[in-house]
Amino acid sequence: MKKRRSFSLSRKRALWGRLFVYPWVIGFLLFLMIPFVQTFRYSFNDVTPANMELHYIGLANFKKALTQDAEFIPTFIDTMRTTAVEVPLIIIFSLFMAVLLNQPFKGRTLVRCIFFMPVIITSGALLALIGADIATNMSGGSTGGASGGMPMLQAINFQQTFSSLRMGQGLSDLLALIIDKVYVIIWKSGVQIVIFLAGLQSISKSLYECASVEGATAWESFWKITFPMISPIMLVNIVYTLIDSFTDSSNKTLEYIYTVIYKNVDYGFSAAMSFIYFTVILAIAGIITFFMSKIVFYMND
């Protein structure tokens, strides 16, 4: 009589892990991998829209995107500039709010819900509409609707204000961009705040008690306990925020690629731009992960 095969705890966990991962793998293959391969094929071809016939032209689409097209590179640089401003500000703000929301006070659950609410009830189109309205108010115009909610921003031109303080043009533009992104930072920080909160609540209270006994201040406890312990969570949030910024519906590079696809009906050229864009995003995410992983602290190490 054959003995029944017993499963160890680690094997059972591995099986459950695979069970939960398989649906994602199937979805990835069907909805991401197949379109990715198709886009890669299109990028090397001139695609006839009528019957989707492919005519191989080699690297011509890539050459056009990098050296001939007048809009792709400037638009891409503008996207990089916006992302370089947004990502650090979102990470800093979300960490700051998570630390505050982790403290005990009355109404804490309600405040947490308020910060996460934009993630649930809003869409990219609504965010773009609000952003355009705020930008109009800041330049002194008025579009009605939501503009009445921010009367103090009307007729304020931040670039002129900073220029009058004899700041350099580059610094003035950067500060104006940061102020212009305030609503975006608050709007996009919901998920990051929740992730940081989960990380903060996983830190053992005994570590803070030991530090307090040793005479450590709250500032020292943050930098020597809190910050190292949530560094893996910070890496996750940085990569998530980076990808979210690069794939945002208001992203100018994506808007230009959509224009080439749907208005100019140039599938090959748009596929080449998409593949270049994807490669740069992958490279940036890989570089950040590589260097961040060297300074990330893991409790089991």
Image (spheres, rainbow, N blue to C red):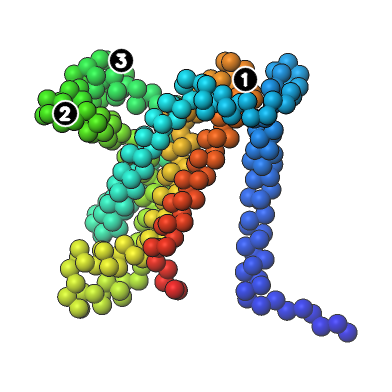
Q: Quadrant of the N terminus?
A: bottom right
Residue 60 x %, y %: 63, 25
Residue type marked 2: Phe
User: How many C-alpha atoms fall within 10 Å of the one at disc 3: few (<14), some, or many (≥20)?
Assistant: few
Determine the secondary structure under disc 3: loop
Determine the secondary structure under disc 1: loop
Residue 153 appearing in the image: no
Residue 241 appearing in the image: yes
Residue at 24% across / 19% down in the picture?
139
**Front label number (3 vs 2):** 2
Label 2, on which residue?
Answer: 162
Disc 3 versus disc 1: distance between alpha carbons?
35 Å
Residue at 26% across / 54% down in the picture?
100
Residue at 63% across / 57% down in the picture?
20
Task: Give the number of the disc on residue 266.
Answer: 1
Residue 248 x %, y %: 46, 34
User: How many C-alpha atoms fall within 10 Å of the one at disc 2: few (<14), some, or many (≥20)?
Assistant: some
Residue type marked 1: Asp
Residue at 64% across / 30% down in the picture?
59
Residue 293 x %, y %: 44, 60
Q: Outermost residue, right direction?
A: 1
Label 3, on which residue?
Answer: 143
The answer to whether 37 is drawn above or below residue 98 in the figure is above
The answer to whether 19 is drawn above or below residue 132 in the figure is below
Residue type marked 3: Thr
Disc 3 versus disc 2: distance between alpha carbons?
25 Å
